[in-house]
Amino acid sequence: MEDRRIGVFICYCGGNISDYVEVEKVRAAVENEPGVVLAKTQMFACSDAAQDEMISDIKEKGLDGIVVASCSPKLHLYTFRAMSLRAGLNPFRYTQSNIREQCSWAHRDGGPFATEKAIRIVRAGIARARLSEPLATMRIETTPKVLVLGAGVAGLMASLTLADIGLPVFLVEKEPEVGGWTCKWGGMFPQGNGSDLVEGLLKKVKQREDITLFTRAEIIERTGSVGDFTAKIRVADGSVVSLEVGAIIVATGFDTYRPAEGEFGYGREGVWTLPEVKEWLAGNEGPLAVDGRPVESVAYIYCVGSRQPKDSELERPNLYCSRYCCSSALHTALQIHERNPEVHQFHLYRDMRSYGKYELLYEEASRKGSMFFRFENDAPPEILAESRRHIVRAKGQLEGDEVLDIPADLVVLVTGMVPRQNDALINVLKLPVGTDGFFNEIHPKLRPVETVMDGVFIVGASQGPKTLAESVASSLAGVSKSAALLKKGYVDLDPYIAMVNAERCVWCGKCLEACPYGAIEKSVLEGKEIASVIPSLCKGGGACVPVCPEDAIELKGYTSEEITAAIDALIEQVAAPVP
Amino acid sequence: MARVNTDFIDEVRRSDGFDATACMHCGQCTAICPMGLDLLPRRLFFYVGAGLEDKVIENLETIFSCLLCRLCEENCPRDVHIAEDVRFLRNYINRKVHKLARI
Amino acid sequence: MPLPIAPLLGFLSDNLTKRRSVMPMSSRKTTRWAAGLDIPAGGETVLYTGLMYQIIPALTSSEKTMSLVQDSWVGQLLSFGRTVNRFVNLTSFMPPADRQEQKRYDQYLRNIVQLLRKAGVTEFGYLYGSELYTGALVRDLGVDDAFEQHARKVHKMLDRQGVRRVITVDPHTTDMLRNVYPKLVPGYNLEVKSYLEVLRESEARPKNRLESEAVIHDSCLYARYLDTVEQPRRLLEKAGVTARDPEFSGKMTFCCGGPVESLFPDKAGEIAGRRIKQLAEAGNDVVTMCPICLHNLEKAASGNGVSVRDISELLLQAYGG
Ligand code: SF4
Ligand code: SF4
Ligand code: SF4
């Protein structure tokens, strides 16, 4: 083994680690490991001061590898890589040993075991660091164009904004018309009308030469990777076009919950979902009548299809709140109050979540005479028939035991949002889907529109229920992430990709079958057929490594030698901790 | 079982003496009422809002027991003019039940 | 047996419409307090008693009648009584008010006049026999027709007398004249202040420092209808009286029970009892500023070792000199 100069930095994490792990003992146990020239402890390794200290240690001691024993690399991998770079150390010669999530937090019951385990984990890190090699990131040139899927308001706004930034857009819509639900739902809060809004956006889109709109079109295939995708689109006439883009924005929206036949009387004349009522209101100007009968009384039942109890008999209950429906129902009630102030309106709700500015809708509706009764989830209202009217029987939770029979000409089921059934799309894009059926982001707070598929962004209600305003905000977030990616002109990819040992490889093709990304191809080297790796497609997933019968394929940064050395160090006996 | 009577709601709505539209039935008023009037005003406003005229009349004595002291109003998060609303209902009862309309 | 509400309401409102007061009394009795004070008759600014301090002692006796009514067959007679009452003043058959009581309540009004004069407020008259009760009780009970009719009568009288500014002595009258009448009576334009506000605005200087303590019972009306919380406290403070606040005080004051006295004397007594307990926990010397509070709390305090006084008495000791 060559002579290495490794520095080890062990973090207290302000007690997160040191409350359960005797950090100083860990330091003492590893300072004499082969190759280690420096072992230190730090209160917060990620703090600026600690990083500065590491940088001067690296420089002064001429370190050629470091181990930071702290939290999960998910948190600070990039922090310490950047620090290494600043210190002039190849960032791939830094190894992070996780002694927090994988040790101190897992052993809060105390005992010397945590310390012993931490020693083993750090030793394993040192063993890997000894074998670490300097690697270089791979640079890929990006295609400065974006594919936007879905031409609802979110998709339209994303396209226009991308075009403003100077990124040409292909906008693909499955339906013959653009505008999604917004188009059909009439009046909006605080002002305006959905179809006017969409019309305005569409006009602008059509004026832009850098936006190509395809309607009645669908994505059927996607190849390539971040910055350099090829998408095949089946367009209206059945032909297929192939598009080169650097990023993909998914703005495919939501579906509305469709109650089962008989659910709260659904299926009877005048028992309609909120979207149905909105379309009905938007499409008729005259006096409000259902089935020829004037509407004198309206009852709303909230949370239909949302916030379903965990223990319900449904196969996959919708546990989430759909966010928009309380406000939207209030808005509808105000429209009805406006159209006919004589109408009585009764709202049977579980919680009134008219958050933010939408609270004004609640205020105004109650001032206009809307009555609000809260019901408990285990005693939902019942809908009974009475001649040509409906009777909504409800037990108001806040008003004692009174059971009310509310006569209603129109019963509005305030239905929420559900994910669109779109298996083909999920398949083509390999999009991650959450337990609720909506697409999943990487980090709910910090990376809300990114997915594990680099370069594929999820925006609007495809990611989860949102109001229109929130959808647009999210779509603009997708735009800024796309632009941040594409405006630079290139992406740097981690060098952790597969490499083929040409001497050993006999080209059996097993690795080609195993790779989900199509990153293996056959090539010829000095007359010999071997497998070779396409660097821009390889994700470093390693599916090829164990299937190779000749052990001819390895992952950079995760070679068999490195992993074996780490395992050996992990199982090596630790001397009984010195009291 | 009580049936919502929209005529009663209309009658109250037409007058401008009664306004409990902001009431959210939270019960802060009831909690502090010196009379310990469980009915007032939380339930009372519910009865009126739901058009349960019979219930209102059934509770005539409670309605006339209110001190109009407004301690409840001080506690009400929605600034409902509770005492004035109670007074309105007294007047309603006086006209409807006590037939004191014109003397 | 619950009190027969309807006949009682009828009885009270009949009294108001026919005899201009819920508790008709001769003007000899209602103006007697002013004897010897040489208050000019009428004027642009008047001290308006609203008859509240005068009616209260009479109430004590009528309450006896009411409790009787509540508990017995007399109640049955009341509806009959209402018919008769329209023609014959039934109130005059009630037991006469206690002389001592009357004198004591008259004295509070005299205190107020003296306090005003000591504070340099001398330019005010009194309407003597023309003064009318405001009708507050009838309005509280929701007999709006009778009340509105009466309010117009009161306004007409004030108008005829050329009154522009009114100094009131109790919160109920203040609320009626300041908050309620303007909404009902077209052309109503009177400046209304309670004597506590007037004193507070004046440069009244105490002649004696009392160096004592008093527990303040805020009236619901002063505190929550009229925003008069700070004035009595400052006046007492200046006079060297440390104001003690009971558990419920200021904006969060607790009712004396008085408002339901006419219909549910038992309930009123119970509330007053609870209030006295709260007050007693803060001290034994209680001051009130409304004749209804005073009357109710006094009753509840008897035998409790708590003394209840009208604030005018205490203020006069300090500012009277
Ligand atoms: S927004 Fe309102 S109606 Fe919709 S699911 Fe949430 S609580 Fe229920
Ligand atoms: S405190 Fe106000 S809002 Fe709450 S129940 Fe009473 S009146 Fe209604
Ligand atoms: S005003 Fe009536 S309801 Fe309100 S606290 Fe006083 S007695 Fe109770």
Image (cartoon, coloured by chain):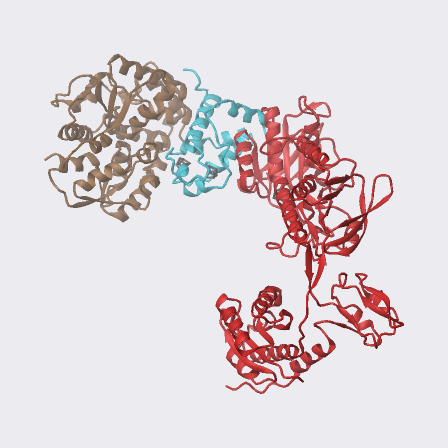
Chain colours: A red, B cyan, C brown
**Which quadrant would the C terminus of chain C be assigned to in this image?**
top left
Q: In which image quadrant can residue B8 be found?
A: top right
Q: Residue at x 61, y 29 (%)?
A: A335
Query: Is residue C222 in sight in this rendering?
Result: yes
Residue A358: give x, y in percent of width and height: 56, 38
What x and y, as percent, mark residue A412? 67, 35
User: Position of A453 compared to C85: left or right?
Assistant: right
Q: Nearer the viewer, residue A367 or A527?
A: A527
Residue at the farthest front position: A526
- Image quadrant in which you'd find residue C62: top left
Q: Is residue B78 above or below residue A139?
A: above
Position of A25 compared to A468: left or right?
Answer: left
Q: Quadrant of residue C59?
A: top left
Q: For the N terminus of chain C, give its image quadrant.
A: top left
Q: In the drawing, does residue C170 fall left or right of residue A166?
A: left
How many numbered dots are placed on residues in this image? 0
Residue C41: give x, y in percent of width and height: 17, 17
Q: In the figure, is residue C81 to the left or right of A80?
A: left
> Is residue A307 at all visible to an observer of this figure?
no
From the viewer's side, name the closer residue of C214 and C1. Answer: C214
Foreground: C119 or C145? C119
Q: Position of residue A476 (x, y in %)?
A: 63, 45
User: Within the displayed image, which quadrant is ligand 1 positioned in?
Assistant: top right
**Residue furthest top as drawn:** C160
